[in-house]
Amino acid sequence: MYSATIQKLIDLFSQFPTVGPRTATRFVFYLTKKNKEEIKELVSAILELKRKIRFCQLCFNIFEPKEISQQKCEICLNPSRERSLLCVVANEIDLAAIEKLKKYNGLYFVLGGLMTKFKKNDLEKLRIKELEKRVREDSAIQEIILALNPTTEGEATALYLEKILKPFQKKISRLGKGLPVGGELEYADEETLKSALEQRK
Ligand SMILES: [Zn+2]
């Protein structure tokens, strides 16, 4: 019912996380009211994102390199971070939530999502092989903290990772109790997340 140009943009916005067709349609009509300069600014900001943002070679966090040759993020490059601790998170948002607490001084590994069920293609989307490689090659790691959502998906992923990581004989811990069951890490309040991290086991 919309023109091909409008429909194409609706389809593109509909692919965004949490955006359904109705919100996508609102976005498109919002854009039709913008002038050319404002549209240019938006387009170039998106292009800049793709041009400037990189994935850290070590932890897969996104970062903006200070120089072209930089392959690791600021956290991995920081010599004052505790290299014996590796905190596994589902995504960059969870990493940012933990960083914001200023309580954790170890390193991270961004898994790239959670398992929805024990499905093979779910696993392929996650950085399981990369995590194994990291743990195998980094002898400084002593403890692996699985900081995953207290949801069915988070639980399934944690169980799978425990199985996969067992042969490396490192201490494997999980966030302590207190996080609302079924909730997500990124929405947990700071005090609750802080105590869950401190009381990990
Ligand atoms: Zn990194």
Image: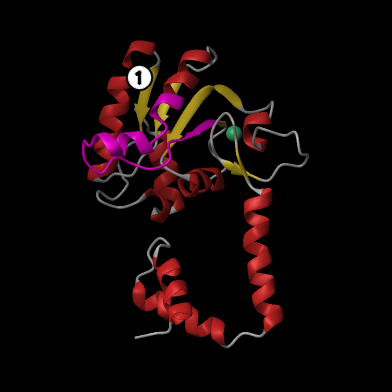
Front in this rendered view, residue 164 or 47: 47
Locate residue 7, reporting x and y percent.
Answer: 41, 77
Residue type, mark 1 in image: Leu
The x, y position of residue 91, in whole percent, is: 45, 44
The residue at the point 47 percent across, 73 percent down is 9
Based on the picture, tell me whether residue 148 belongs to the magenta stretch.
no
Q: Nearer the viewer, residue 136 or 79?
A: 136
Q: Is residue 4 visible?
A: yes
Element under label 1?
A: helix
> Would residue 182 be found to the left or right of residue 69 on screen?
left
- Which residue extends farthest bottom? 33
In this figure, what is the number of numbered marks? 1
Q: Residues within 10 Å of mark 1 (few under 14, many from 20)?
A: some
Can residue 169 be seen at all in this image of the molecule?
no
Check mark 1 vs ligand 1: CB closer than 8 Å? yes or no. no
Residue position marked by numbered label 1 in the rendering? 165
Q: Residue at x 35, y 19 (%)?
A: 165
Residue at the image point whose x is 54% and y is 36% from the top: 60
